[in-house]
Amino acid sequence: MLRLRSFAFNFTLYVTAAAIALAATPALLMPRRAAVFVLHNLSRLVMWLLAALAGTRYEIRGALPRGPVLIAAKHQSMWDTIIFPAIFDDPAMVLKAELLWIPYYGWFSKKAGMIAIDRGSGASAIRRLITQGKAALAANRPIVIFPEGSRMAPGAAPAYKPGVAALYRQLGVPCVPVAVNSGLYWPRRRFLRKPGTIILEFLEPIPAGLDRAAFMAALEARTEAATAKLLAEGGFAPATLAAKPVGKTARTARG
């Protein structure tokens, strides 16, 4: 049954996404907000399909940040990249530059004003990241960044990159850490979509103005501690990584 439901979701997702992307192609020639509208509603549809076909729902904990703010999220699954356009009206998400070359997904992301970073460009990439980040904040858009850059399996050792610290220091805004346990239900590089409830938790903001070392220490400590609790809540224990890979006020939402 798990494989059947996973197949039903994956098949329906790709067919539906392709159909919507083709139908929405004219939005690429319209003002930026048209692409934002497409990504927002497509993301909400994916959440609904995931719940209806795979039995995977989600719960948002903590206060949803508003206005110009830096959001630094734990990254375990492709789900993480879909949920933020679904729950925010117009987020500026930091993504790898090569993703912009993916037909339709990349085109709509670029048109919507997502922030692309070429991690192989060194200091110039950081400068472009800061420039685009300042433009996003000026437009009152929340910036979403995955500090580790790539999806990390549940229980994997953290590997935070310097880009988030550069943004935090240069933008001068609070940073909201985000913990998640999505890797238990939508494992990276795997076909299965497991039933249950993915939890995404917005944590206490880190105030602006800390030095680089203090900021990175606070971000990693808060995010990793909260993520460990969410993984445990989902039934994950570090020992299961080798034995069997599985990859506050709450508001529950059905995608």
Image (cartoon, rainbow, N blue to C red):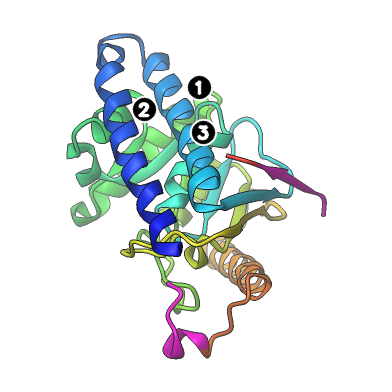
Residue visible at 41% across and 28% down? Answer: 39
Is residue 14 in the magenta section?
Answer: no
Residue visible at 42% across and 23% down? Answer: 36
Q: Which tag, 2 or 1, sits closer to the chain's start? A: 2
What kind of element bears circle 1? loop
Residue with the mark numbered 3 = 44
> In the displayed structure, does residue 102 sit left or right of residue 207?
left
Residue with the mark numbered 1 = 139
> Can see residue 166?
no
Name the amino acid type tagged 3: Arg
29 shown above or below 209: above
Q: Which label number is shown at residue 232?
A: none
What kind of element bears circle 3? helix
Label 3 environment density (alpha carbons within 10 Å; few <14, some 14–19, many ≥20): many
Q: Position of residue 71 (x, y in %)?
A: 55, 47
Q: Which tag, 3 or 2, sits closer to the chain's start? A: 3
Q: Are marks 2 and 1 in contact (CB under 8 Å)?
A: yes
Which of 22/212 is in front?
22
User: Where, quadrant-wise, is the C terminus in this rendering?
Assistant: top right
Kindly report which numbered mark, 2 or 1, lies closer to the viewer in this rendering.
2
Task: Tell me the distance, in whole angstroms, between the alpha carbons under discs 2 and 1.
Answer: 11 Å
The stretch in magenta equals 240-253
